[in-house]
Amino acid sequence: MHKFSGTSFSQPIHFAACMIVFGILQVVGFHMAKTEYHNGAPHYNLVSSELWYQNVPSDKPIAEYAKDQGFDMHLRFVDQTEAAALEKNHKQKIWLGMAIGIAATIGAIIVFGIFGNSWPAAIGISLLAPLFVATRGSTIF
C-alpha cells in the first residue's frame, strides 16, 4: 500500500465513499418524505360493501351506477379498513423518509467530524443534501 506522509491512500477513498453514501441516503430519505407530504393523503372512493351491493339496480352496470352516484371512476374503491391501511402507509412513508434522512445526516456529521477532524465542515457538508432536496430535489426525481 502506498504511503503519503503517514496516511494511506485508501483511507481518503473510504472516507469519500462513506460521505457519498450518506449524501445519497440523505437525498433519498428527505425526498421521499417531501414527496409524500406534498402529494397529500391518498385519494379513493370510500364505499360500504354491504350497502353498495344492496342498492345497485340489476338492470344497470355497476360502473354506470357508480358514475351516477358521483364517484370518481379514476380512483380506487375501498372499504373502511383498506382506507385506514392506506392512510397508515402514507404516514409511515413520511416518517420513514425523515428517519432515513436524519440518520444519514447524523452519520455524516459523525464520520466527517471524527475522521475528517473538522466539526464545522462536517455540519456544513451534511446540510448540503437537505438543502438540495428543499430547493431542487423535486425536479430531479
Image (tube, grey):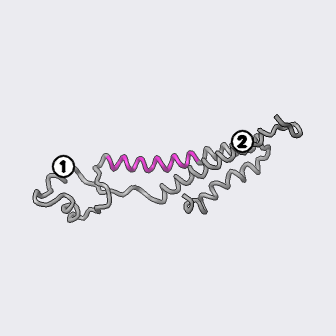
**Which residue: 60% across, 52% down?**
27
Where residue 14 appears, as percent x and y from the top left, is 73, 40
Where residue 22 appears, as percent x and y from the top left, is 65, 46
Q: Which residue is mark 1?
A: 50
Farthest residue toward the top? Answer: 1
139 to the left or right of 127: left
In the rendered view, would you say 19 is above or below 6? Answer: below
- Secondary structure under tag 2 reads helix
Where residue 59 appears, as percent x and y from the top left, is 10, 59
**Residue span colored magenta:** 82-100
Q: Quadrant of the C terminus?
A: bottom right
Q: Which residue is mark 2?
A: 111
Query: Which of the 4 quarters of the picture holds residue 116?
Result: top right
Q: Judge whether residue 98 is colored magenta.
A: yes
Secondary structure predominantly adopted by residues drawn in magenta: helix
141 to the left or right of 11: left
User: Mark 2: few, some, or many residues within 10 Å (few <14, many ≥20)?
Assistant: some
Front residue of 113 and 129: 129
How far is disc 2 from disc 1 in space, using C-alphas? Answer: 57 Å
**Which residue: 77% across, 39% down?**
11
- Secondary structure under tag 1 reads helix
